[in-house]
Amino acid sequence: QVQLVESGGGLVQAGGSLRLSCAASGRTFGPYAMGWFRQAPGKEREFVAAINWSGGRTYYAESMNGRFTISRDNAKNTGYLQMNSLKPEDTAVYYCAAAWRFPRRYSDSGEYGYWGQGTQVTVSS
Protein backbone atom coordinates (compact mmCIF):
# COMPACT_ATOMS: atom_id res chain seq x y z
CA GLN A 1 0.00 0.00 0.00
CA VAL A 2 1.12 3.51 -0.79
CA GLN A 3 -0.43 6.57 0.80
CA LEU A 4 -0.21 9.89 -1.05
CA VAL A 5 -0.71 13.38 0.32
CA GLU A 6 -0.68 16.45 -1.91
CA SER A 7 0.17 19.96 -0.80
CA GLY A 8 1.07 23.31 -2.29
CA GLY A 9 -2.23 24.30 -3.83
CA GLY A 10 -3.76 27.71 -3.34
CA LEU A 11 -4.92 30.90 -4.98
CA VAL A 12 -2.66 32.56 -7.52
CA GLN A 13 -3.07 35.26 -10.13
CA ALA A 14 -2.90 34.47 -13.81
CA GLY A 15 0.71 34.28 -14.94
CA GLY A 16 1.88 33.13 -11.55
CA SER A 17 3.46 29.87 -10.45
CA LEU A 18 2.82 27.12 -7.92
CA ARG A 19 4.68 23.97 -6.99
CA LEU A 20 2.62 21.04 -5.88
CA SER A 21 4.14 18.29 -3.78
CA CYS A 22 3.03 14.69 -3.36
CA ALA A 23 4.44 12.91 -0.31
CA ALA A 24 4.33 9.12 -0.41
CA SER A 25 4.37 6.83 2.60
CA GLY A 26 3.85 3.16 3.27
CA ARG A 27 5.40 0.76 0.80
CA THR A 28 7.50 3.36 -0.97
CA PHE A 29 10.35 1.14 -2.10
CA GLY A 30 10.02 -0.31 -5.54
CA PRO A 31 9.56 1.05 -9.03
CA TYR A 32 6.31 2.93 -8.78
CA ALA A 33 5.38 5.55 -11.34
CA MET A 34 3.72 8.81 -10.39
CA GLY A 35 1.18 10.83 -12.24
CA TRP A 36 -0.69 14.09 -11.82
CA PHE A 37 -4.30 14.54 -12.85
CA ARG A 38 -6.74 17.38 -12.39
CA GLN A 39 -10.48 17.80 -12.28
CA ALA A 40 -12.34 21.05 -12.77
CA PRO A 41 -15.96 21.51 -11.64
CA GLY A 42 -18.34 19.78 -14.00
CA LYS A 43 -15.54 18.20 -15.99
CA GLU A 44 -13.94 14.79 -16.12
CA ARG A 45 -10.61 14.08 -14.50
CA GLU A 46 -7.83 14.73 -17.00
CA PHE A 47 -4.22 13.71 -17.29
CA VAL A 48 -1.56 16.32 -16.59
CA ALA A 49 1.82 14.58 -16.40
CA ALA A 50 3.53 11.30 -15.51
CA ILE A 51 7.03 10.25 -14.47
CA ASN A 52 8.71 6.89 -14.11
CA TRP A 53 10.63 5.63 -11.10
CA SER A 54 14.05 6.98 -12.11
CA GLY A 55 12.67 10.27 -13.40
CA GLY A 56 14.21 9.65 -16.78
CA ARG A 57 10.87 9.38 -18.57
CA THR A 58 8.32 12.15 -18.34
CA TYR A 59 5.13 12.71 -20.28
CA TYR A 60 2.75 15.64 -20.42
CA ALA A 61 -0.67 16.44 -21.73
CA GLU A 62 -0.33 18.57 -24.84
CA SER A 63 -2.50 21.28 -23.33
CA MET A 64 0.21 22.00 -20.75
CA ASN A 65 2.30 23.49 -23.59
CA GLY A 66 5.56 23.23 -21.68
CA ARG A 67 4.29 25.24 -18.71
CA PHE A 68 4.36 22.35 -16.25
CA THR A 69 7.29 20.23 -15.10
CA ILE A 70 6.98 16.94 -13.23
CA SER A 71 9.84 15.67 -11.09
CA ARG A 72 10.50 13.44 -8.10
CA ASP A 73 12.97 12.94 -5.27
CA ASN A 74 12.94 9.27 -4.32
CA ALA A 75 15.18 9.89 -1.31
CA LYS A 76 12.36 12.04 0.08
CA ASN A 77 9.56 9.86 -1.32
CA THR A 78 8.11 13.00 -2.85
CA GLY A 79 6.91 13.99 -6.29
CA TYR A 80 6.47 17.51 -7.59
CA LEU A 81 4.55 19.42 -10.21
CA GLN A 82 5.97 22.84 -11.02
CA MET A 83 3.33 24.96 -12.70
CA ASN A 84 4.30 28.21 -14.42
CA SER A 85 2.38 30.79 -16.46
CA LEU A 86 -0.84 29.66 -14.85
CA LYS A 87 -4.13 30.46 -16.53
CA PRO A 88 -7.67 30.64 -15.13
CA GLU A 89 -8.48 27.46 -17.04
CA ASP A 90 -5.89 25.64 -14.92
CA THR A 91 -8.24 26.02 -11.96
CA ALA A 92 -9.01 22.53 -10.68
CA VAL A 93 -8.39 20.03 -7.94
CA TYR A 94 -5.04 18.43 -8.63
CA TYR A 95 -4.47 14.80 -7.68
CA CYS A 96 -1.30 12.77 -7.59
CA ALA A 97 -1.44 9.07 -8.29
CA ALA A 98 0.91 6.10 -8.19
CA ALA A 99 1.14 2.85 -10.12
CA TRP A 100 3.47 -0.09 -9.74
CA ARG A 101 5.69 0.04 -12.79
CA PHE A 102 5.18 2.65 -15.49
CA PRO A 103 1.78 2.09 -17.07
CA ARG A 104 1.58 1.68 -20.81
CA ARG A 105 -1.49 3.92 -20.87
CA TYR A 106 0.03 6.50 -18.55
CA SER A 107 -2.68 9.07 -19.29
CA ASP A 108 -5.46 6.71 -18.23
CA SER A 109 -6.46 7.30 -14.62
CA GLY A 110 -7.60 3.67 -14.38
CA GLU A 111 -3.96 2.57 -14.62
CA TYR A 112 -3.15 4.07 -11.22
CA GLY A 113 -4.05 2.20 -8.07
CA TYR A 114 -3.21 4.81 -5.45
CA TRP A 115 -4.51 8.35 -5.18
CA GLY A 116 -4.12 11.35 -2.93
CA GLN A 117 -6.98 13.41 -1.61
CA GLY A 118 -6.32 16.30 -3.98
CA THR A 119 -5.28 19.91 -3.56
CA GLN A 120 -7.21 22.89 -4.89
CA VAL A 121 -5.54 25.25 -7.35
CA THR A 122 -7.40 28.45 -8.18
CA VAL A 123 -6.09 30.88 -10.76
CA SER A 124 -7.70 34.31 -10.80
CA SER A 125 -7.83 36.47 -13.90
Image (cartoon, helix red, strand yellow):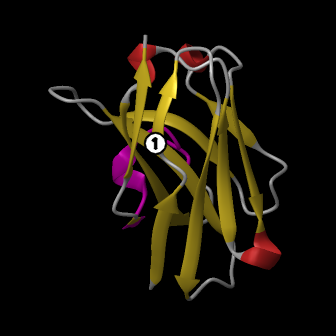
In this picture, is 1 found above or below 41?
A: below
Rendered image quadrant of residue 17? top right
SS at circle 1: strand
Q: Is residue 96 above or below residue 89?
A: below
- Callout 1: few (<14), some (14-19), or many (20+) C-alpha neighbours within 10 Å? some
- Looking at the image, the residue that sits furthest to the left is 42
Q: Residue at x 73, y 63 (%)?
A: 53
Q: Main secondary structure of the magenta part?
A: loop
Would residue 104 be seen by someone viewing this image from the given angle?
Answer: yes
Which is more toward the observer, 60 or 70?
A: 70
In the rendered image, the vertical position of residue 16 relative to residue 4, given as above or below: above
Residue 3: percent from left, percent from top: 45, 78
Magenta stretch containing residue 109, yes or no? Answer: yes
At label 1, which amino acid type do we have?
A: Gly
Q: Nearer the viewer, residue 57 or 43?
A: 43
Where residue 104 appears, as percent x and y from the top left, is 55, 46
Which residue occupies 44% across, 42% down?
A: 37
Tell me if 5 is positioned left or right of 59 in this view.
left
Identified at 67% across, 25% down, the residue is 84
- The tally of labels here is 1
**Magenta region, residue range:** 104-114
Residue 79 within the segment the image draws in magenta = no
Among all residues in the image, which is located at the extreme bottom? 26
The answer to which quarter of the image holds residue 39 is: top left
- Which residue appears at 81% of the width and 77% of the height? 75
Q: Quadrant of the C terminus?
A: top left
Residue 63 on image: x %, y %: 53, 15
Quadrant location, the N terminus: bottom left
Q: Position of residue 116 (x, y in %)?
A: 40, 64
Residue receiving disc 1 = 10
Task: Say left or right for 18 vs 55.
Answer: left
Residue 103 appears in the picture as rendered: no
